[in-house]
Image (cartoon, rainbow, N blue to C red):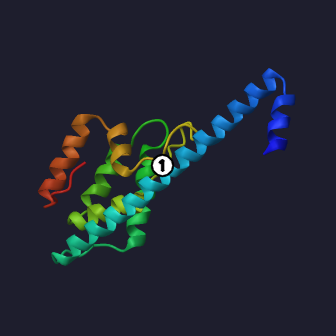
Amino acid sequence: MKAILDSWKRMTTIQQVITIVIIAVILWFVVKWLKEQKVVADRIVTEKAEVKVLQESGMKQSYTDSKFESWANELENYMNGGGTKITGINRIFGYLHNDLDFVKLEKAFGLRLSSYSWSWFTSPSDLMDWLKGDLDPDEIKAINKQLKLQGLTKQI
């Protein structure tokens, strides 16, 4: 500790300021990463509980997990970058038969970064955030109406 203090005293004011800034930036990234890890852990617990409740009520998923993952990737492609492909989004939500399918699609999407985000300064977002960020309110209402007609209670 004495050696660190001696080194600090030998530094110029500019070197001390630069050192403090570097330490602050590193701490900021560590805290940001820890917060993201907590969000991910909380999400996993919530999704598992929700899946369990829906399965215990007798609901069964209509497709394989790999199909939901494929659709999640398609949704990302439809929303990532310039322009949103609403017909593709509508098509995928049209395949969902029950709330468990909706939850499985959300789970498969997980948390993703947009290719147009400043990844150092933004956090990954879930499917609902991506949809709300890309679709206008009328498009969301139309999808929610279709989900309700399909018998789902889950909504965007």
Q: Amino acid at mark 1?
A: Lys
Q: Quadrant of the rendered structure where residue 109 is?
A: bottom left
| Residue 106 screen position, x and y as percent | 34, 58
Q: Is residue 148 left or right of residue 52?
A: left
Is residue 143 depicted above or below 13 in this figure?
A: below
Q: Residue at x 48, y 50 (%)?
A: 36
Q: Nearer the viewer, residue 38 or 2?
A: 2
Numbered disc 1: secondary structure: helix
Identify the residue at the far top of this view. 13
Is residue 93 among what the camera can see? yes
Q: Nearer the viewer, residue 2 or 97?
A: 2
Is residue 62 depicted above or below 108 in this figure?
A: below
Graded by Cα atoms within 10 Å as few (under 14), some (14 to 19) or many (20 or more), the crowding at tag 1 reads: few
Is residue 71 among what the camera can see? no
Q: Residue at x 19, y 77 (%)?
A: 56
Give the residue number, with chain letter if any, for mark 1. 35
Q: Residue at x 75, y 32 (%)?
A: 19
| Residue 124 screen position, x and y as percent | 47, 47
Q: Is residue 108 left or right of residue 117?
A: left
Identify the residue at the far front of this view. 2
